[in-house]
């Protein structure tokens, strides 16, 4: 199985690239969705977050007020570290289950869309690593437009992550998403070809097909040896 890492900065275009993968038939495990699921009302993650941040981060229906929690953690690094510490085990487990489910289905190439891939030190589990990059002005402009936040809020959010230029140096593949969607789609075509090239032996051995093949070969070899001895 090939586990491709997809990361970047906030509003650099990860979801946009994820959507292109999905519509090309490549399944995605989306860490933002996992992170939402693990804090649904009544879950273990929800209890931990409410205990640490108090009832003032709850909406009337008892769900977490994400906008409120976002304001708190993106303006206070110690609170952000606390939230990250509280949720990291739940998010990692959720991502792991996402991978297991796709493995059981027999998927051979999957993409993990993880904004904090490097920060959470998960990059060692993925190859290749794709970084979606944008220039700083475009990033601020897209973030303020999409989330309706001020430039200062946008900068706080950007600074809450490792620098995008640094992430770019750690990438196997860089998608420059600073231009038009058309330009991004053109780059994506090449990336898709690279990502869906035939699996290496190692990747094949890790896939469901490979594991089944190894098990069947082992059993057949065992039977033959047994027959030969007796
Ligand atoms: C703070 C929260 C409630 C804000 O929710 P909101 O719906 O406004 O944003 P959303 O979850 O869609 O995240 C948007 C983007 O913010 C960035 N981001 C989210 N959490 C963090 C964080 N702890 N540190 C740095 N950047 C973050 C990511 O780029 C993400 O794609 C939420 O982001 C959250 O629970 N974050 C902690 C969990 C986490 O680490 N998520 C990232 C998954 S790896
Ligand atoms: N090439 C592009 N041209 C114009 N707008 C774009 C382009 N790529 C993405 N956008 C827009 O920029 C915004 C951010 O993109 P997207 O949501 O894909 O980023 P993201 O990295 O997934 O964000 P987050 O980190 O918050 O999850 C969205 O409003 C999206 O429609």
Image (cartoon, helix red, strand yellow):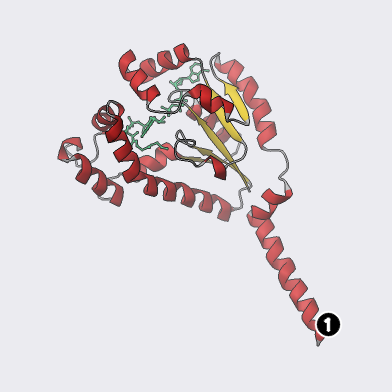
Image location (x, y in percent) of residue 143: 39, 19
Residue most extreme to the bottom: 230
Q: Is residue 129 visible?
A: yes
Q: Is mark 1 within 8 Å of ligand 1?
A: no
Q: Say whether residue 138 is left or right of residue 20.
A: left
Q: In the rendered view, would you say 109 is above or below 206?
A: above
Image location (x, y in percent) of residue 82: 29, 40
Q: Residue at x 50, y 15 (%)?
A: 135
Local secondary structure at mark 1: helix
Q: Say whether residue 90 is left or right of residue 82.
A: right
Q: Is residue 149 visible?
A: no
Q: Residue at x 64, y 22 (%)?
A: 187
Image location (x, y in percent) of residue 83: 30, 39
Q: Residue at x 45, y 11 (%)?
A: 137
Image location (x, y in percent) of residue 123: 54, 40
Quick one: label 1, few (<14), some, or many (20+) residues within 10 Å?
few
Image quarter for ligand 1: top left
Residue most extreme to the right: 228
Q: Residue at x 81, y 88 (%)?
A: 230
Residue beneath label 1, please?
228
Q: Examine the image and state in which quarter residue 63 appears.
A: top left
Which of the pair 187/27 is nearer the observer? Answer: 187
């Amino acid at each position: 199985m090939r586990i491709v890492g997809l990361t970047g900065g906030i509003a650099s275009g990860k979801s946009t690239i994820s959507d292109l993968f999905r519509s090309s038939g490549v399944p995605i495990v989306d860490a933002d969705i996992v992170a939402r699921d693990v804090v649904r009302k009544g879950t273990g993650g929800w209890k931990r977050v409410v205990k640490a941040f108090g009832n003032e981060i709850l909406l009337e229906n008892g769900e977490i007020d994400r906008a409120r929690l976002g304001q708190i953690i993106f303006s206070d690094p110690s609170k952000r570290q606390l939230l990250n510490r509280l949720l990291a085990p739940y998010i990692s487990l959720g991502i792991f289950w996402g991978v297991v489910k796709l493995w059981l289905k027999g998927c051979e190439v999957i993409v993990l869309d993880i904004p904090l891939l490097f920060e959470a030190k998960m990059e060692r589990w993925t190859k290749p690593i794709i970084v979606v990059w944008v220039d700083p002005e475009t990033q601020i402009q897209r973030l303020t437009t999409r989330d309706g936040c001020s430039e200062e809020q946008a900068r706080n959010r950007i600074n809450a992550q490792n620098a995008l230029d640094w992430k770019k140096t750690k990438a196997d593949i860089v998608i420059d998403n600073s231009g038009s969607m058309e330009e991004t789609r053109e780059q994506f075509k090449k990336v898709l070809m690279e990502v869906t090239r035939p699996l290496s032996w190692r990747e094949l051995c890790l896939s469901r097909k490979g594991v089944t093949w190894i098990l069947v070969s082992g059993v057949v070899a065992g039977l033959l040896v047994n027959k030969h001895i007796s």
